[in-house]
Image (cartoon, grey):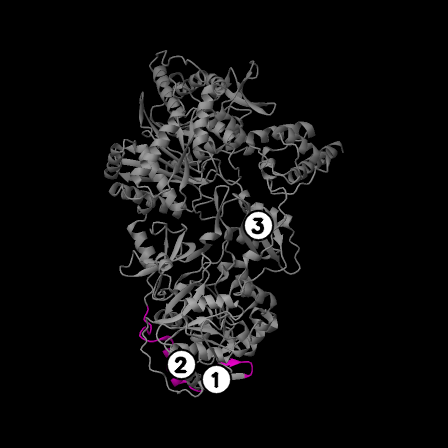
Amino acid sequence: MSIEQAQLQGGQLAEEEEVVALPVSFAQQRLWFFDQFESGSALYNVPLVLRLKGKLSIRALEQSLEQIIERHESLRTTFATEDGEPVQVIHEQVEIPLQFEDLTDRPESAREAAAEQLIRAYAHLPFDLGQGPLLRTNLLRLAEHDHALLLTMHHIVSDGWSLGVLLQELTALYTSLLRGESGALPNLPVQYADFSIWQRDWLEGDVLAEQLAYWKAKLGGTLPVLQVPTDHLRPAQQTYNGTSIEFAVSKELTERLQAISRSAGATLYMTLLTAFKTLLHHYSGQEDIIVGSPIAGRNRAEIEGLIGFFVNSLVLRTDLSGAPSFRELLGRVKETTLGAYSHQDVPFEKLVEELQPERSMGHAPLFQAVFALQNDALQPIEWPELTVHPQPLELEVAKFELSLGMHETPDGLAGVWEYNTDLFEEKTAHRMIGNFVTLLESIAAQPDLPVGELSILTGKEREHLLFGLNDTAVEFPEHLLLHQLFEQQAERTPHNIAAVYGEQEMTYAELETRANQLAHQLRAMGVGPDTAVGVCIERSLELVIALVAILKAGGAYLPLDTEAPAMRMHQVLTDANAPVCLSQERLRENLPTDACTMLFLDTDWAKIARQATDRPAVDVTPEHLVSIYYTSGSTGKPKGVASTHRGWVNRMAWMQRQHGLQAEESVLQKTTLTFDDAAVEFYWPLMVGARIALLEPVVHRDPRAILDAAIRWQVAVLQFVPSMLNMVLDTITPEDRAQLNCLRVVVSSGEALRPDTVRLFLERMNGILTNTWGATEVSIDSTIHICSEADVRATEVVAVGRPIDNNQVYILNKHLQPVPIGVAGDLYLAGVGLARCYLNNPERTAEAFIANPFVPGERMYKTGDRGYYREDGSIQFLGREDNQIKLRGMRVELGEIESAIDQHQAVKESVVIAHEAEPGVKRLLAYYTLQAGEAGEPSDIRKYLKELLPEYMVPAFLIPLEAFPLNANGKVDRKELPLPDQSRPELETEFAPPETMVEELIAEIWSEVLGVKKIGVYDNFFALGGHSLLATQVISRLRKALEVNVSLRVLFEKPTILELAEAMEDLLLEEFDEEDGTEE
């Protein structure tokens, strides 16, 4: 018999009896609603497999099952709808024949596999709640004395406890029938329908008000949504594909956990729940965590023996803030658990209805992870001449994102880790299990340690993340100073061209001579080791001379923006205590001449030229300062990053080892001096005999000018921030590419690099594209990733790769503990490149440069950036900490939204910000530019995003721009992005009245159901206060008004009047066409 035949012959309901419609319980109401939404799903099938070894009486088995069906009204129940509300219908008689399949005609070696295949297929068959029956029985014969019995019920009429009841009654009845006995089971005092009626009546009383008050206090405010990092982008609509992995906890460890439980006056359940929440805290970084936990819901003796859906879900919310120890957190969980048990009678469905949490198609309401500690697993049972072995059956579904089920065994604890396979890979699930067991060991060893400091990494993981991925030791000329690399090269190639600017050029010998003269002049003006020297010079040969001369004098160069306000320059020069600033006469008017002595390299050169041409003798070591770069500070006062020769020598040596710049090649110097990447364009070519090709001032933001200069000077290396690279890629022509066959390396840094930029680069430019990341505090860059076609297919921004030579990257949580692969953390940098300090700012230095807990005696720098390790060991950059926001209780990485927008074919690039128009009300604003010739209406992009992102991540406003405002470094200036008109902010949409007949009908129905008067076609049903039960009423009314069969799912997928009306009109047209075709 085929699976399809089995489905049709699963049993017939008697039609002659009188049936009565009764109210459903709240739990049944939720599953009925789910079935309306996901009809044909086997998600809530409850299978029980019994392996029967011995002599089986099939007739006695059939009679036993018939009596059980007769005893329990729930097994004779179907569900109907009255006025849009579900009701249960109890039938007097239901025939559920035992479906028999004989496998003994197959080879013995193939029977087990065939049985497993059939059992899975039968267990996955969906139920029809309206037609029933909601119990199926299948018996497979594998041998004369070997059978497999599959009992499958729908969860709406059963639960886990019910399986035990079913097995107990089946055992008693089968045994009594074979022995010729009667009265094996006492009469049932009540039926499930009695419970449903009682529950509805009880929930109208004062007791409900008191219990609800408890839950509203516990679950008040914005509820957090669990955000454990996933391997795949979260689908816009929740899926239920899943699987599970079994694991074990040793008896010795279990006993230690039990001892901790006893000492805290807690149960093992509470201890394991606390450990699970601690793991989720480590993975998500969240301090407000909700976990669901099932409870039998049978706290009355008269319902203990019923088959029915009694199980309830407790919503257990825990505050993990304040760095509690595990023992302290266990106390919090204990208090929450006891409170929840005392108020367990409020159905989960009633809580959802009362609390009205933010609804999303992408996740379950209230909680997304579940923990359960079960009683002992079902044990083998003896029947007359039979041994019955209950067997687990994996349905490959997951009701929640993560579920952890455990039960005690004689050998310790057995666990089942269930996960959604559309979110997590199997290797990730195995890693999480390993982390959980390691965490249990940490708890048993140090229960008084703060939970954030408890280790969750296995020893092998920890070693790999901290040391394996950071094994970057490479020899470099650490005894040399940065300018000495140039001096050695000048001796080797004195006649090579060191720099060109327009029609001017300068050899290495000329640069050496002029730099020595200027160095002597600076020495005479008080410059020595660690002395700051201001540099405010437009791009020119004088700028190259200045940058070499300052180092020769023992000083550290202090770059100043030639376009910066005089007050800003004055602030920086004064803070650095610079005795002199090098500049040009034409810039005098904008200079703070009262801050220090000004030396103009154009008009004062005659004086400088009288200085000696030999190298000045200066007592400078690699630990002395080479530069002081001032970066913006959160307090408004800029911070001076004081870097040493040692770090910069390593940085240049790595650059050469990585890219092998040749003496005959050129590097285009176009980066603004105050941007630290400019140092590479100056000092790297000078250490190998190559040429610096200086771009004229101002035009460094002109992509055409950049390309022309690159072609003219046949450059081998170009550096860009991604936003500037995009402009160049938009400008470059095939002719340009042909003339740039000398280009070998393009370096992208300073901003997140997006997949579309990589695609355009591979299509339009020569050479390799590298994505680098780092900080001025660590000698510019600390990681590198070489881009490839694989990056074009990335769904996130491009990875930043692995550490460069002699640098280390740590990804840590707030307690400085390494996080697992895939888990986001704070990025810390260490190694040779580390700066000395923030100049004259010991407080800020102490905050940012801290002791390295993994290498005694060393320091590390907290970057303020976030990222995670990918499976291949490379680092995925997530952006600044302040680029991560909380929205409606959910943590949102703005970069993830930008990546989604950038995938739209019409979009060139995008920027997303969180704007707080009024206190506490944040809205996402997305700005985007368009590809040439594309339209890209906001409505089209919004529709596209709704297919990629959860509803809460779709920006409230999408604003097209001709171009983004850029700051002096060529990065997007977010402060200058224009704000949109935010009328009707309470709904985040502008009011537009209904126009068509269908729109007016929907608006009228919504108004009546929601109690809202003014509803526009762009308003969201759920933003107006709608929820699942009200949605069923809307759909029921629409079905009646329009006489069209519309699914409940449509309202969730199209929650605005405009979208819903379009869907309804399409359905009406379809039905009209079908009727028209029938008449023909």
Q: Callout 1: helix, strand or loop?
A: helix
Residue reaching furthest to the front: 594
Residue topped by disc 3: 925
Dot 1 or dot 3: first in sequence order is 1
The total of numbered circles placed on residues is: 3
Callout 3, which amino acid?
Leu
Q: Is residue 1045 left or right of residue 828?
A: right
Residue 291 lies, in percent from the top left, at: 41, 36
Residue 1017 lies, in percent from the top left, at: 66, 39
Mark number displayed over residue 519:
2
Mark 3 vs mark 2, CA separation in Å: 52 Å
* Quadrant of res 773: bottom left
Between 241 and 285, the one nearer to me in the picture: 285
Between 348 and 433, the one nearer to me in the picture: 348
Report the span colored magenta: 474-503
Mark 1 vs mark 3, CA separation in Å: 53 Å
Q: Callout 3: helix, strand or loop?
A: strand
Residue 474 lies, in percent from the top left, at: 33, 69
